Amino acid sequence: MNNALTTEVAKKEPENQPTQLPSRWALSRVLVLIAIMSCMCGLLTGVMTYRTVGMTDSFWLDWLRAFGTVILTVKPLALMSLWVVSRLVGYVMPHAKETTRNIVIGLIMACVMESIVAFMAAASHFGFTDYQQLMAGWWSGLMAALPVSLVVMPIMAITVKPKIKQFLNR
């Protein structure tokens, strides 16, 4: 009987099977995450850019520069910090409902990430030469985008995060 199982498994999995490229599902999962991150990043950097430099002739160029800086530097950090914050909240609140944990994660991530995004956006607008202008731009951008983020992040954590988690685990 054991020999029959071995033979059956050997028939299903050939030894010299070539490596396969990622399936279309795997690619679509990555594209969904990139689209969601880009929309969130675009919205928040747009609010920060508007608040920091106003609607000037160079607004779109300033926004695009801030968006590019943030998407290339901050979003990889966001994914790592989301993992760390999720683990910490799970450790601190092991008996809480998943929805409660997701709300707490969303609020923490909103505060932490908006501080970082506002700093990077201000740095792309003003540079590092004038510290007071950089800090004023950071504070202005943070105060403009934080309320938006404090509304959007918990909604994302309650509704979108579980669906994304389910989608990625398919």
Image (cartoon, rainbow, N blue to C red):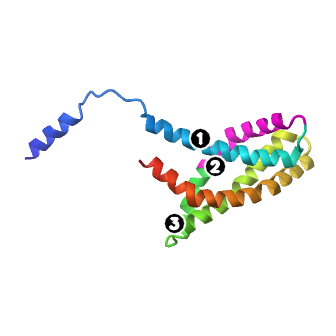
Which is the main secondary structure of the residues drawn in magenta?
helix
Foreground: disc 2 or disc 3? 3
Label 2 element class? helix
Image-based side of 131 in relation to 5, left or right = right
Give whichever of discs 3 and 1 has the lower sequence position: 1
- Does residue 169 lie above or below 67 as drawn? below
Give the number of marks. Answer: 3
Q: Measure how far apart labels 1 and 2 are at the Cα level.
A: 13 Å
The residue beneath circle 2 is 78
Give whichever of discs 2 and 3 has the lower sequence position: 2
The residue beneath circle 1 is 34
Nearest the camera: 157 or 11?
157
Residue at figure coordinates x 65%, y 57% from the top left: 153
- Does residue 141 lie above or below 34 as drawn? below
The residue beneath circle 3 is 98
Q: Measure how far apart labels 3 and 1 are at the Cα level.
A: 24 Å
The magenta-colored residue range is 57-79
Circle 3 crowding by C-alpha within 10 Å: few under 14, some 14–19, many from 20 = some
Visible residue check, residue 127: no
Label 1 sits on what residue type? Ile
Visible residue check, residue 17: yes
Foreground: disc 1 or disc 2? 1
